[in-house]
Amino acid sequence: FVDFHGWSPVYESNIFVNPGSFHGTHVAGTIGAEGGNGIGVAGVSQDVSMISVMIFDESGYTTSFAIMEGYRYMTAIMEKGVDVVAINQSWGGGENMISEEGQAFVKEMTQHALDHNEYGAVWVVSAGNSSLNRDDQYYFSIPNNINSPNVMTVASSDANEMPSGFTDFGNYTVDIYAPGSDIVSTYPGGYAYLSGTSMASPHVSGSIALAKALFPDDSGVDLMTRILASG
């Protein structure tokens, strides 16, 4: 079983080329742009395979169904034997846990995280860009508050290794900081600088891929532990 195209649940399509998806293109370049070729930028892990799962359209629109279809797709390819090391999730939102719909949504998302943990896949999740202390939030933040041992939440640091002015933070709800201010990466038509915790999390996803290459027998949680201990 090999999937060359990935899946776009928001469009219910596996169209390979989507030139308007700048956000995912930038994130992918940080994870694994080819290095040593004298062109553009080099990713953290320069010899890596990636699968695109597009749960938002170019305007940032999505649905609960599209999000869950993305997770179901990842579960399906892992069940077919695809070795997924990290699932970068440069997105976030909130759920009202008072409603039955919100509880059901979080319950299903949690089950996907737990299932992915069984396959050794780490969820690498951006913390958010609202300068909020996530330890004190009044709503259930997804996917970074999902209760599964393989969820790793990433805040953004700047060029001085200080928290970026926009980054969310938290002693209990954020696991690690990574560069997220003025990050240059691939972009439709060339290259561009972007800032955000969306730019921070792919640095960690790339690092997990490198760690897996060195320690192929490690579980996802083992790889997380190595990354956290190195910082």
Image (cartoon, helix red, strand yellow):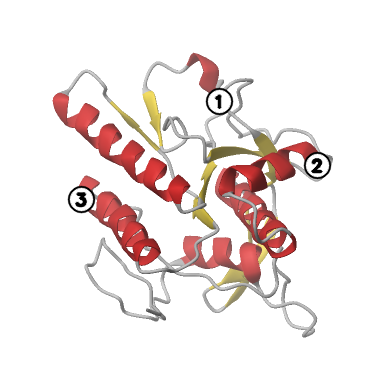
Residue bearing the label numbered 3? 65
Residue in front for this viewpoint, 165 or 176: 176
Quick one: which residue is furthest to the left in this view?
100
Evaluate if marks 2 and 1 touch, with contact meaning CB atoms under 8 Å apart. Answer: no
- Residue under the image location 52 percent in, 70 percent down: 50
Q: Amino acid at mark 2?
A: Ser
Q: Amino acid at mark 3?
A: Phe
Q: Which mark is residue 17?
A: none
Q: Is residue 102 left or right of residue 165?
A: left
Q: Is residue 134 above or below residue 90?
A: above
Mark 3 surroundings: few (<14), some (14-19) or many (≥20) residues within 10 A: few
* Res 61 visible: no
Q: Is residue 229 above or below residue 27?
A: above
Q: Which mark is residue 173?
A: 1
The disc, 2 or 3, on the residue closer to the chain's N-terminal end is 3
Residue bearing the label numbered 2? 230
- Mark 1 lies on a secondary structure that is loop
Alpha carbon distance from label 2 to label 1:
19 Å
The disc, 2 or 1, on the residue closer to the chain's N-terminal end is 1
Q: Is residue 74 above or below residue 97?
A: below
